Image (cartoon, grey):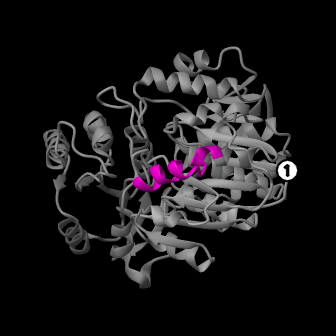
Amino acid sequence: MKSHERPGFTGTQKHYHLMGIGGIGMSGLAHILRKDGNRVSGCDNCLSEITGGLEREGIAVWPGHSPQHLHEVDVLVASTAIQETEPELAAARTLGIPVWRRIQVVGEILRGGYSLGVTGSHGKTTTTAMLASILMAAEADPTVLLGAQLGLIGGSSRAAHGHFRLAEIDESDPLFQFLELDVGIITNLEADHVSPDGLARPNYHASFQALQKAVHSFAANAATVVYNGEERWLLDELTQGTNRVSFGLEQGDCHAAGLELRPFGSRFELVWRGQTLGFMELQVPGQHNVANALAAAAAALVAGLPLAAIGAGLSQYVGAGRRFEKVGELHGAVVVDDYAHNATKLWALLAAAKNTGLRVRAVFQPHRYGRSEQEWPLYARALEQADEALILDVYAAGEEPVNLTSAQIAHNLVSHLQHQGHPARYGSWEEISLHLQQTAAPGDLILTIGAGNISQLGRALVGPKEAV
């Protein structure tokens, strides 16, 4: 981060206390801080399998937030969701305990080596995971921070001693613009994490213009920026004046030729600055994953990684947690879980699902009221690709309704789909589960979709005996 923004690591061991430690990103940070020899503790309003794993690792985790957690704490690290008014955070400031946001700590970790950071409205988790796979194939012993579980690194993070340091960078946190990276990757940009009422709040920029300005700063602060050249109307402008490299499905410094989409993967030739380097094969489906692979390949080439490692890394990548993740079967139906929570992600997921040739049954849980109120018409059009759409209540993520209730959003989705002649229904968790248990059959692809707790439904459907 910029010099005046740096938290000021000294290299000495400290006691870090993480508020919101149960989140996938914060828990990964806890692992790395712990493996670096620091004392780590944390708290979260919701205890889970993740917090249980942290406790087994020797990290103390308390339920809820309280100033009492601050005893002998050297640094308080707060996730984006923790507001300044939270008593525990406010008490830390009163006591003179340094308060850092998660991304500030990420920035300091990245500064310890050759840094690569991936941001964008969608595809950043997969692109980061593909890059991690490439670095592992190159035997580069990378440090990795990821927003999902990845079997290849044994979780959502990896602490190591190699030169390369890689992180997924969440663009919803305004501080991401101050990171100083060797390679910054921008997968794409949309008006996601933009406030519906023009007021900045945790996980929301005040406007799309504010988000664009932050992305421009992110690009300007990178030694090299790798960006989606097929979004010329926006990203060309935002990366003007930088040392930049473009990627795209059909055009850009790094692009694909002879693309062959398969039911559960793809094959294409990798073209780099006009030269065809060789064939690449993916084990994850969809055109969107080809774009993610091209972003990862472009970044790897900029970083000087060998072509053989790029090919091996991409071919061995089978997906990160909750990214087209097969969780098991129900009466012969394949059950797949995916994090898709905005309209573009939803569209890309369902397009890939249709390409499998199976009957696509989409169980969709809208995520956050602000986003869902703005995007429900786009959700509806994306869901038209499904053979059946089953709609759950909005997963609020701590938000209150803005203008539409959960039932109204669901009703709008179902009414649109039914008017277009597509089977759709709105129901409770129990009603949807029972419907699927009674009707699932071989040839079905059941998708549980969303960024909330929807993944639990798919795992409950398959049961312990059938889960993979």
- What residue lies at 40% left-to-right and 27% top-to-bottom? 206
Residue range in magenta is: 87-104
User: Seen in the image, is 156 located left or right of residue 198?
Assistant: right
Helix, strand or loop for disc 1: loop
- What residue lies at 80% left-to-right and 54% top-to-bottom? 11
- What residue lies at 77% left-to-right and 35% top-to-bottom? 182
Can I make out residue 60 in this image? yes
Q: Position of residue 83 (x, y in %)?
A: 42, 46
Q: Main secondary structure of the magenta part?
A: helix
User: Seen in the image, is 209 located left or right of residue 249?
Assistant: left
**The residue under label 1 is which amino acid type?**
His
Q: Which residue is mark 1?
A: 163
**128 versus 121 height, above or below:** below
Q: Position of residue 219 (x, y in %)?
A: 66, 26
**360 versus 115 height, above or below:** below
On whether residue 275 falls in the magenta region, the answer is no
